[in-house]
Image (cartoon, rainbow, N blue to C red):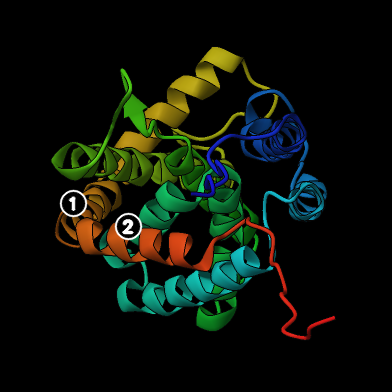
Amino acid sequence: MKRTPDIYRLSLQSKLVLSATSLIALLGFIWPFFYSGNLHWIFAVAIAASALLLISEIGIGSIDAKSIALLGVMSAFITLLRPLGAGAAGLEPIWFALIVAARVFGPSWGFLLGITSMTSSALLTGGVGPWLPYQIFAAGWIGLLAGLLPHSIGGRKIRGVSEKVMLIGMGVFAAFTFGILMDLQFWPWVLGRSTELSYIPGGPLSENISRFITFHFASSMAWDIPRAILTSILIAFTATPFLQALRRCYFKAAFVSPIEFKSNVKA
């Protein structure tokens, strides 16, 4: 029996490109703590680096034409899910699909799925604005982390209830992480400069961090908690059939395996 390629292991090239991309994007999130200007332009560099990641994955064979096709299908599915919640009170059904799909197809694929699905859904819902680059890379990181979740412990595969519990934990983590990352996007602008929680341009690092943490817990729990609850419920009820369907798709389509053409013409 032909051995299925291990899509969960990142090549050195993938690690380097993913690390560089994430580091560049991270600077766009945390600039208020070390720079008094504006670094929104840095996301243009990060998006270009993401395109380089896709090209790199194709070049080394980690992502083939079939994987790209499924990437498009799953991006379309998540795009259609997004308007169902419209972000009201944090009720966003997209995260369970991103987490489960990334679990099956690996970290680099999950990172790209987060980026492409968030971009396409923003175009569909009219959610294009200065917040979009933040949403794109927050979703990309969630897909990356979901793809990096362990597949075995002590030689035993993680399946069934234990896998579902792990994915629910990832869903809760993703819900609160997304809230923190989105608060970093508008905290410097939303309060002006006259409140006790306002961003202080060029202010002491400890003071700005303290103000941000207080602002986040005072303003975001009403969104983060419902998001975590909805994501957990969706994973609890749909993870098993969703995982089975995606894994069946992976093995039957022989993703990342070379396509061989056999001729029936006899010499």
Instruction: Examine the rendered structure and indicate whether residue 68 appears above or below residue 144.
Output: below
User: Is 48 left or right of 132, judged from the image as shown?
Assistant: right
Percent position of residue 244, x then y: 29, 60
Q: Quadrant of residue 157?
A: top left
| Element at label 2 | helix
| Element at label 1 | helix
Percent position of residue 98, x then y: 42, 57
Please tell me which residue is depicted at 29% across the width and 53% down the height of the picture.
Answer: 223
How far separated are the C-alphas under marks 1 and 2? 11 Å
Amino acid type shown at disc 1? Ile
- Density class for disc 1 (Cα within 10 Å; few <14, some 14-19, many ≥20) is some
Mark 2 sits on what residue?
96
Please tell me which residue is depicted at 74% across the width and 54% down the height of the picture.
Answer: 54
User: Is 52 left or right of 109, judged from the image as shown?
Assistant: right
In the rendered image, which quarter contains the C terminus?
bottom right
Mark 1 sits on what residue?
229
Instruction: Tell me whether the residue at label 1 lies in contact with that at label 2, contact meaning CB atoms closer than 8 angstroms.
Output: no
Percent position of residue 199, x then y: 56, 33
